[in-house]
Image (cartoon, helix red, strand yellow):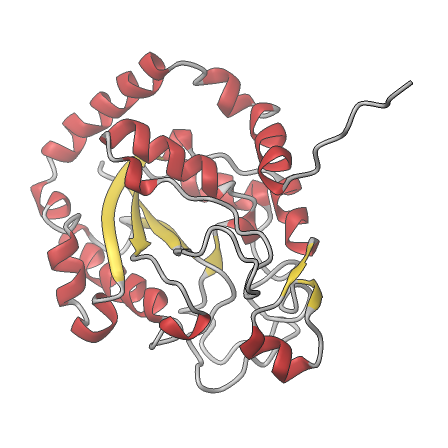
Amino acid sequence: MSLARIAYDIRVIHDCIVHDTDIYRNFNTTAKKLSLYRKKKKMLDNNPEIKRLIDITFVRSLDPKRGALMGKVGWLPTELIITDPRIQEMCHGMFSYPKVLSDKIGMSYGPCPNCGKASACPPFSYTAQEARSKLDQGDIFIVLQSRNFVEFTDVTYPGFHEVLLRKLKKEIEKAKGKKAVTCVLSAGACRLCHPKSCLGGGACRMPEHRFYALEAVGVPVAQLCDDIALLTGNKGWKMSFLKYFGTPRQTPKRWKLTCGIAVTLR
């Protein structure tokens, strides 16, 4: 008698969590998502000062060297973004380390080395509930996605996306006021102090500029990318989870970063 095989693929775990949330159940059809998107688009059309900022050329112009690493800019309704503490728990998962990191720490496999240590990672980040509250105060989530990278060293400016997020946040506040931005969520461990290392343990040199990652506050990034791909018709937004990261067996070979800013249009 053979036993059924159980799939523990990270995408399967991600999707199981997503499908077990109220937001996924409430917006369980394409029609519902598109209806909400059209409603928010009307609001955005009435805010041309914000609409003009959602443009890849503009974002790249904020910092030409770092901006060259950014691939796409778009938006989706904040109501579609899921936050769940079970996604945060995935930060404790085991994975392979890229060579540039394994050479530094003397390990090639283990839990995320930033989790529990870096000051913008769990448990120092927002809880999923706190992130939900901040997202709910906004109307749209402006999404920035990098171009595809192959090698870990392809990111010539570590923390480039956080610099761009900070500058875009400033532009939004100039256009709409200080309260327009309700939440800024980055990708991976905060690198604003680079080349200095993070103080760790919750301590921060620039707490007013510290950004927590989407996954660190419980956002299933793959679902967010699926949703913006659905709403925009651009499948290039979709992402795949990496297997054997930083090793010759890595699949897929390319990877990218996703981050964004929640904005109120009222």
Judge by depth and name the residue closer to the eye, 231 or 103. 103
Instruction: Point out the image quarter for the N terminus.
Output: top right
Residue 44 vertical position relative to residue 168 in the rendered view, above or below: above
**Can you tell which quarter of the image residue 111 is in?**
bottom right
Check the image and name the residue furthest to the front.
Answer: 1
Residue 208 coordinates in the image, percent (x, y)? 42, 69
Residue 133 can be seen in this image: no
Residue 201 can be seen in this image: yes
Q: Is residue 184 left or right of residue 220?
A: left
- Tell me which residue sits at (24%, 43%) in the image: 74
Check the image and name the residue furthest to the bottom.
Answer: 196
Q: How many marks?
A: 0
Residue 108 vertical position relative to residue 25 in the rendered view, above or below: below
Q: Is residue 172 left or right of residue 129?
A: left
Check the image and name the residue furthest to the right.
Answer: 1
- Tell me which residue sits at (49%, 81%) in the image: 205
Q: Is residue 189 left or right of residue 209?
A: right
Q: Is residue 55 left or right of residue 32?
A: left
Residue 266 coordinates in the image, percent (x, y)? 22, 36
- Tell me which residue sits at (62%, 42%) in the image: 10
Residue 212 coordinates in the image, percent (x, y)? 49, 59
Judge by depth and name the residue closer to the eye, 262 or 67. 67
Residue 185 vertical position relative to residue 200 in the rendered view, above or below: above
Judge by depth and name the residue closer to the eye, 96 or 124. 96
Residue 78 coordinates in the image, percent (x, y)? 37, 35
